[in-house]
Amino acid sequence: MALLARMWAYEHRLEHGTMQEALPTMGRLLIGLGVVLILAGGLLLILSRMPINMPGNLRWTRPGISVNIPLGTMVAVSILLTVILNAVLYLFRRWG
């Protein structure tokens, strides 16, 4: 993540002049990423306590072996993350 921030700051400096002008924007970016990581961590803690039995999840149980393939959960998480990422990118484009 630090490499991404340095690359972004270098590109911003080339376009707009000084590094001093890039620091406030980079600070807001890092705070935003921190908030997103905290929310994602909290969501994972909550979801780890809930049994997720969605339609589309495949489960085979035999003596001595159990196989779970969460296809329905993967599709639902993919759709949710796509919506969240698009909303974040929309906000960054609107503010930038």
Image (cartoon, rainbow, N blue to C red):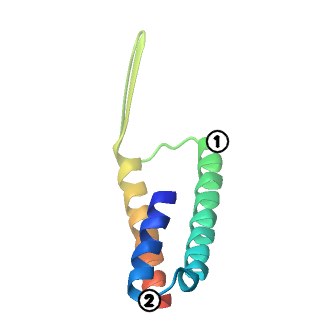
Dot placed on the residue nearer the N-terminal end, 2 or 1? 2
In the image, residue 13 sits, relative to residue 59, either above or below, namely: below
Q: Are marks 2 and 1 in contact (CB under 8 Å)?
A: no
3D distance between C-alphas at marks 2 and 1: 48 Å
29, 80: nearer the viewer: 29
**Is residue 84 toward the left or the right of residue 32 in the image?**
left
* Mark 1 burial class by Cα count in 10 Å: few <14, some 14-19, many 20+: few
Q: Read off the residue under disc 2.
A: 16
**Is residue 46 toward the left or the right of residue 56 in the image?**
right
In the image, residue 96 sits, relative to residue 65, either above or below, namely: below
Q: Amino acid at mark 1?
A: Arg
**Is residue 66 toward the left or the right of residue 18 in the image?**
left
The location of residue 12, given as percent across then percent down, is: 43, 80
- Secondary structure, mark 2, is helix
Residue at left 42%, top 67%? Answer: 7
Residue at left 61%, top 54%? Answer: 43
The location of residue 18, given as percent across then percent down, is: 51, 85
Q: Read off the residue under disc 1.
A: 49
Can residue 96 be seen in this snapshot? yes
Kindly give the residue lying farthest to the top in the view shown: 64
Q: Amino acid at mark 2?
A: His
Per the rendering, the mark at residue 74 is none
In the image, residue 39 sits, relative to residue 68, either above or below, namely: below
The location of residue 75, given as percent across then percent down, is: 35, 54
4, 90: nearer the viewer: 4
Residue at left 39%, top 76%? Answer: 11
Can residue 1 be seen in this snapshot? no
The location of residue 93, given as percent across then percent down, is: 42, 85
- Secondary structure, mark 1, is loop
